[in-house]
Image (tube, helix red, strand yellow):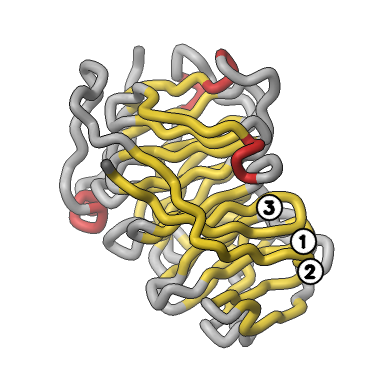
Amino acid sequence: MKNITFLTCLLAFFLGISSTQAQSPSSGRTSLTLKNDGRVMEDIGRIQAITFDPDGSLYALEPAGRRLIKINDDGIQLSQTASFGRPTDIVMAGFQIWVTDPMRGQISRFDRRLANLADLRELVSQESRIRLSGVVSAAITSGDVIVMLDSYEQRLYMVNVKGWVIDTIEGFGDLRTPMTTPVRVEVSKSGKIAVADESNGYVYIFDRFGSFLYLINTAQKNSGFNIVGLAWEEDTLWIGNSNGLEVYSEYGSMITSWNHSYFGGPIIDLAIDMDRLAVASDGFIAFYRIVRE
């Protein structure tokens, strides 16, 4: 199989410690359980995406009401209506909140008080300017590089907070199991990149250089596949969809899973901060503690 190669060594500096290529299933992993901490945010509409702020707050994207919501321990702290088209994902980039909006072909940017900053309408590289109409998801690395997934071009752009392209990963069509509709990207602290494809049910795992490592085939276990929530907790990958939540080791073997009934509905997105898990479902967000035994 032909690897997807990363074009420069600069990204290694930003993404940090190198990841280990999968060889065999993990063994001796501490078991994981979830403890409901009693907090549930209800009647907030159908949330599309959520992300934690390092200060403990949670930001939620509610497309139907074109709202960006900030939630803390006391409930909804702030709510801001914005001129979104079809917002798809949300990520903390430095001290800003970035919202991908492929319908309007832009990244909407906000400060932590939800004041709208200048929208990003194109990316700038040495060769050209890149339109954002295909960018459907974004994630942040431990080195504060934003990884943007262009679903139309099937590329990943590595971008700094000013919108300058550091490098590009492409060649998804060279994989033995090609991507068809990639919709979500997440990056682990060690630099592993997960890309979810809603059409074929696969989650593709790459190392920090863009070399393909392995596939996770959720379609084998689920009757259907939709836009999923992805979250890394160290090197374990948490995958949520309408069927429930699954946790995979750094080698791609399943550690544990929960049915959607445990959460009271299908999972639309999830976010992890240390031992805290937030799960967005249809009309509510529930909060849990991750317990390692």
- Looking at the image, is 99 positioned above or below residue 232? below
Q: Secondary structure at mark 1?
A: loop
Which residue bears the numbered disc 3? 133
The structure residue drawn at horizontal position 74% and vertical position 72%, both measured from the top left corner, is: 67
Foreground of the two, 221 or 174:
221
Q: Is residue 6 visible to the viewer in this orientation of the structure?
A: no
The structure residue drawn at horizontal position 66% and vertical position 66%, both measured from the top left corner, is: 41
Q: Which three-letter amino acid code belongs to the residue tagged 2?
A: Arg
Task: Judge the density around disc 3: few (<14), some (14-19), many (≥20) Cα neighbours within 10 Å.
Answer: some
Question: In the drawing, does residue 3 fall left or right of residue 96?
Answer: left
- Looking at the image, is 96 positioned above or below residue 184? below
Q: Which mark is residue 63?
A: 1
Which residue bears the numbered disc 2? 66
Q: Which three-letter amino acid code belongs to the residue tagged 1?
A: Pro
Q: Position of residue 61 (x, y in %)?
A: 67, 64
Task: Judge the density around disc 2: few (<14), some (14-19), many (≥20) Cα neighbours within 10 Å.
Answer: some
**Circles 1 and 3: CB distance less than 8 Å?**
no
Q: Which three-letter amino acid code belongs to the residue tagged 3?
A: Ser
**Circles 1 and 2: CB distance less than 8 Å?**
yes
Q: Secondary structure at mark 2?
A: loop
